[in-house]
DNA sequence: CGGATAGTTGACTGTTTAGTTACAGAACGG
DNA sequence: CCGTTCTGTAACTAAACAGTCAACTATCCG
């Protein structure tokens, strides 16, 4: 079965890193090859173009990183309102961590690339659309559950999810522009406001087990 | 005083158009020159780089287009809640119009460029930050006024403005990614929800004179 | 008119980039 | 241990690109 290699994975990792740190347009195939320590001939052995590499890298990001985290954070074993709170808090933590490690806020790579390429590069852009739409059901179902258990005021869950997700993406984009994670500090608070948490005389909460914070955004 | 020219303005217009239609990174100096019908030598007579041109073009966009529209839409002669409603409705109308004219949604050029370049191109990026921050006082003051006249539930106007603006930017980015203006159809409705309009038994409203819709976003 | 000022041009340089190819080497299966 | 299959490499081509320059042209003002 011939020689084996992980060069294609090194290329995907390098591409994602570089595109996230700068932008899709600012990164060249040579940059990616250098970071991955792969020669250009090998690049073209595995991929036909930067766009094809980007699509593969994004799909890999979802499968290997985001989906497992989302599945854990939105586990039905966690109280619905806590799923949402932890999700929002996790986004803040994640950006804090990135800032500490890389010296700058990077925001959401999928949203950034999607916004940058929305009027061209149709394959890459539609992959970003796809991934973003995969996150929606998690939020929407948590909202529906929270309405059912009375922690949220009743309403249309789809509509409420749209509002929360757009708000979140707007905030993350803003944090990236400002290069300041503190913009996201009140994310859980503000999010709960938007979602209209019911004002009950707060019980000392025999609350659900601590949910893992999402490390994606 | 020698020969006169509007080539620098043609360059700014062309740059803004192209960057808006595609992205900062995807547009070359030659592209801009071609669209503006200007030779490259003239480009370098007026500007030192693409970044310098972009900064000038963005400032011009604010001064000549956005600021006048914002001033009109947020005129104190309009009821505060209507300023906000019209602002949001105007964003939808504007994107509908662009879609009709150019065949695709373009979103907000300032936010798109800002997000794309946030980790490099510091001059361009800080200009986008500046312009975005100039829009905030309009929204915040309208919210404060609406709280004062009782149409909005009381609260922290700054906080409420943050939420509304982030939500708006998230929605516009989403519309661009989806290439669908209808995403923005409910913008005024959803916005009023977020802002917590007081549920009064709606008077047949001896409402304020119709405010001009904002054509910026 | 005529010079000073402001703007224009095309042809040029050098660099960066995407993409190709012929060949060398490495691992596995038999 | 040998042939097949898969992987890696350097050296290459052609195109796109940023940036420069000396010569040219238009317009204004005195």
Image (tube, coloured by chain):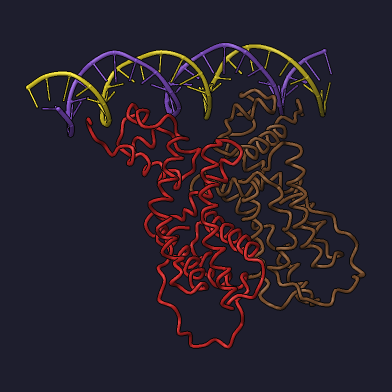
Chain colours: A red, B brown, C purple, D yellow
A84 is higher (above) or lower (below) than C29: below
The residue at the point 55 percent across, 35 percent down is: A121
Quarter-of-image position of residue A43: top left
D6 is higher (above) or lower (below) than B186: above
Report if residue B162 is visible in the image: no
Quarter-of-image position of residue B73: bottom right
Q: Residue B103's x, y, as percent? A: 71, 36
Q: Nearer the viewer, residue A157 or A66?
A: A157
Q: Residue A128's x, y, as percent? A: 52, 46
Question: In the shown orientation, is residue D1 left or right of residue B39?
Answer: left
Numbered label tally: 0
Report if residue A47 is visible in the image: yes
Q: Residue A73's x, y, as percent? A: 44, 65
Q: Nearer the viewer, residue A113 or B128?
A: A113
Q: Nearer the viewer, residue B110 or B94?
A: B94
The residue at the point 73 percent across, 69 percent down is: B143
Question: In the shown orientation, is residue A133 left or right of residue B77?
Answer: left
Question: In the shown orientation, is residue A127 left or right of residue D5?
Answer: right
The N terminus of chain A, quarter of image: top left
The residue at the point 66 percent across, 52 percent down is: B172
Q: Nearer the viewer, residue B56 or D2?
A: D2
Q: Residue B113's x, y, as percent? A: 59, 45
Q: Residue furthest right?
A: B206
Question: In the shown orientation, is residue A7 left or right of residue A138?
Answer: left
The residue at the point 68 percent across, 25 percent down is: B38
């Amino acid at each position: 079965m011939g020689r084996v290699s992980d060069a294609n994975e090194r290329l995907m990792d390098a591409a994602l890193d570089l595109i996230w740190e700068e932008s899709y347009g600012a990164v060249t195939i040579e940059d990616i090859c250098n970071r991955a320590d792969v020669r250009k001939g090998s690049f073209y052995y595995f991929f036909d173009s930067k766009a094809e590499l980007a699509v593969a890298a994004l799909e890999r990001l979802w499968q290997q990183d985001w989906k497992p985290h989302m599945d854990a954070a939105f586990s039905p074993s966690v109280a619905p309102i806590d799923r949402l709170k932890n999700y929002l808090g996790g986004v803040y933590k994640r950006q804090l961590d990135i800032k500490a490690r890389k010296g700058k806020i990077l925001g959401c790579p999928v949203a950034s690339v999607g916004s940058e390429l929305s009027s061209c590069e149709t394959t890459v852009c539609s992959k970003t659309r796809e991934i973003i739409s995969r996150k929606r059901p998690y939020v929407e179902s948590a909202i529906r559950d929270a309405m059912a258990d009375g922690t949220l005021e009743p309403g249309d869950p789809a509509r409420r999810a749209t509002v929360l997700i757009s708000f979140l993406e707007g905030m993350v984009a803003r944090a990236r522009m400002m290069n300041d994670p503190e913009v996201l500090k009140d994310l859980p608070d503000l999010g709960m406001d938007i979602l209209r948490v019911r004002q009950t005389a707060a019980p000392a909460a025999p609350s659900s087990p601590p949910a893992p914070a999402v490390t994606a955004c």
